[in-house]
Amino acid sequence: MLTRILSILGIYKVYEKWLWNQVKNGVPPEHIAIILDGNRRWASEKEINPWLGHERGAETVEKLLDWCLKLNVKYVTLYTFSTENFTRNPKEVEEIMRIAGERFLKLLTDERIHKNKVHVKVLGRTNMLPDDLQQRIHDVEKATEGYDNQFLNFAFAYGGRAEIVDAAKAIAEQVKEGKIEPEDIQESTVEKYLYTAHMTKQDPDLIIRTSGEERLSGFLVWQSAYSELVFLDVYWPDFRFIDLLRAIRTFQRRKRRYGT
């Protein structure tokens, strides 16, 4: 059994190195966004509580940070919890909030965040979250707001349509106060009021969705207009470095046209 495991690990490392050599000299996507899908199905197949899938998925997010730092990806945006997810079983939602609280607390003192000057931001209607989680999010955002080397965004209590509605309301208030004339509203105006306004590169170059589902589910509705999409048949808790490399290789092989 041990020999078989070592053999599998050896093959994995060879394949990982082969993929790395294929992508390392290409142009990496500057902004990668990922829909972290499949936590519950991963847990269901193992006949364990769904929040244990979310726990494992949170561990994968920690690994992802290392991989993206290695690849020098400047912007990473993760779809972790939607506004619709609040309708799930109350116990599951409670556990997700607990896990999120623990992870944001850990990020606060994570030396990778401060050493690499990673700006951490939560995108969404955070007022819908428990007060203690809101405080932890505030603490992490405050501690990293001056960093601009890399950006790590968590779409949490997020909805793509909700984001556009919130931007429209903010612009309407500016018009009401006479600060913006309606005829002056452009696409660039809207972008200033999106959740992603803190980044120079708001639009993802590459969007990855795990679990085999092939839809965006309202993720970055405005920003994804010209993103390259890659759908992987792997649950998020089982996502590996080779899966990220495969997605980037696919991205590098595509010719981006931007409507031309």
Image: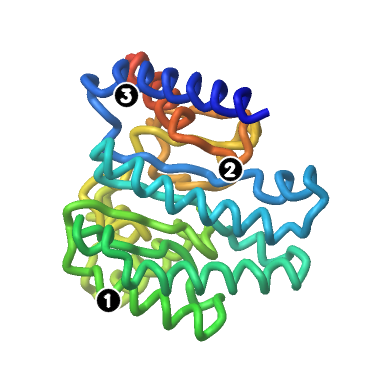
Image position, residue 127 (x, y; %): 50, 78
Instruction: Name the amino acid type tagged 2.
Output: Trp
Of helix, strand and loop, which one carries label 2?
helix
Instruction: Name the amino acid type tagged 1.
Output: Lys
Q: Are marks 1 and 2 in contact (CB under 8 Å)?
A: no
Of helix, strand and loop, which one carries label 3?
loop
Per the rendering, the mark at residue 236 is 2
The nearer-to-camera label among 2 and 3 is 2
> On the picture, is 221 further left or further right than 192?
right
Q: Along the line of sight, which residue is nearer the eye, 181 or 255?
A: 255
**Which quadrant of the view contains residue 252?**
top left
Instruction: Name the amino acid type tagged 3.
Output: Tyr
Pointer 2 or 3: first along the chain: 2
Label 1 sits on residue = 142
Name the residue at 45% across, 47% down.
Answer: 220
| The N terminus sits in image quarter | top right
Mark 3 neighbour class, 10 Å CA radius: few under 14, some 14 to 19, many 20 or more:
few
Of helix, strand and loop, which one carries label 1?
helix
Per the rendering, the mark at residue 258 is 3
State how far apart marks 2 and 3 are (Cα). 29 Å
Name the residue at 60% across, 24% down.
Answer: 3
Name the residue at 42% across, 39% down.
Answer: 224
Image position, residue 119 (x, y; %): 26, 61
State how far apart marks 1 and 3 are (Cα). 36 Å
Image position, residue 152 (x, y; %): 34, 55
